[in-house]
């Protein structure tokens, strides 16, 4: 399979309650191998998350959460997708699509969806075979 080109360098989404969203993303992203990396700025206006050596996703109360967005995090396996979904539900997320194959999106597409504390549609997806 050809290597995927990174399309977005980094992303920050607006949240209403930094502490609540921080707890959600810390728990939901941990099964995917992403952890809290801290703030991007000295002003500490945001909290970044990512894999080791990366911090390309952040949350911030500096941006008003306006409208729902969809963000999909890459998982290394179907088990990772399942664990993401379970962890997100355990921290209080609303289920927006149980883990499963989504052939309507692509062959080998396995994903799960939850709504974060601000109503954003957050997904974990694995691209691969059974």
Image (tube, rainbow, N blue to C red):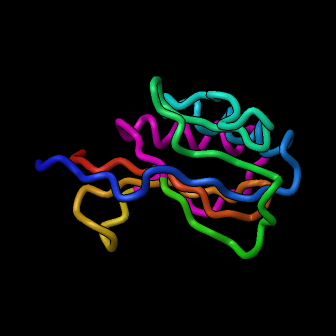
Relative side of 17 to 9, left or right: right
Percent position of residue 103, x then y: 30, 67
Between residue 49 and residue 91, name the one nearer to us: 49
Q: Residue furthest left?
A: 1
Name the residue: 79% across, 36% down: 44
Is 96 rendered above or below residue 52?
below
Percent position of residue 22, x then y: 76, 39
Q: State the count of labels.
A: 0
Name the residue: 51% across, 50% down: 10
Asked whether 17 falls inside the magenta stretch, the response is no
Instruction: Please identify the quadrant where the C terminus is shown.
Output: top left
Q: Residue furthest top?
A: 52
Q: Could you say which quadrant of the image residue 106 lies in?
A: bottom left
Name the residue: 64% across, 29% down: 36
Percent position of residue 19, x then y: 86, 39
Between residue 122 and residue 128, name the one nearer to us: 122
Between residue 50 and residue 30, name the one nearer to us: 50
Percent position of residue 16, x then y: 86, 57
Relative side of 84 to 18, left or right: left
Asked whether 83 falls inside the magenta stretch, the response is yes
The stretch of residues the image draws in magenta is: 73-100
Name the residue: 37% across, 53% down: 110
Q: Could you say which quadrant of the image residue 48 lies in?
A: top right
Is 47 rendered above or below residue 69?
above
């Amino acid at each position: 399979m050809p290597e995927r080109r990174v399309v977005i360098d980094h992303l920050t989404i607006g949240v209403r309650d930094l502490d609540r969203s921080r707890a959600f993303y810390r728990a939901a992203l941990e099964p995917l191998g992403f952890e809290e990396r801290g703030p991007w700025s000295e002003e500490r206006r945001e909290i970044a998350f990512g894999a080791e050596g990366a911090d390309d996703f952040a949350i911030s109360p500096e941006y008003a959460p306006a409208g729902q967005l969809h963000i999909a995090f890459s998982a290394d396996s179907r088990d990772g997708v399942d664990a993401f979904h379970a962890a997100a539900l355990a921290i209080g997320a609303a289920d927006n699509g149980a883990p499963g194959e989504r052939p309507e999106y692509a062959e080998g597409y396995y994903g799960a969806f939850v709504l974060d504390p601000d109503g954003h549609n957050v997904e974990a997806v694995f691209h691969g075979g059974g």
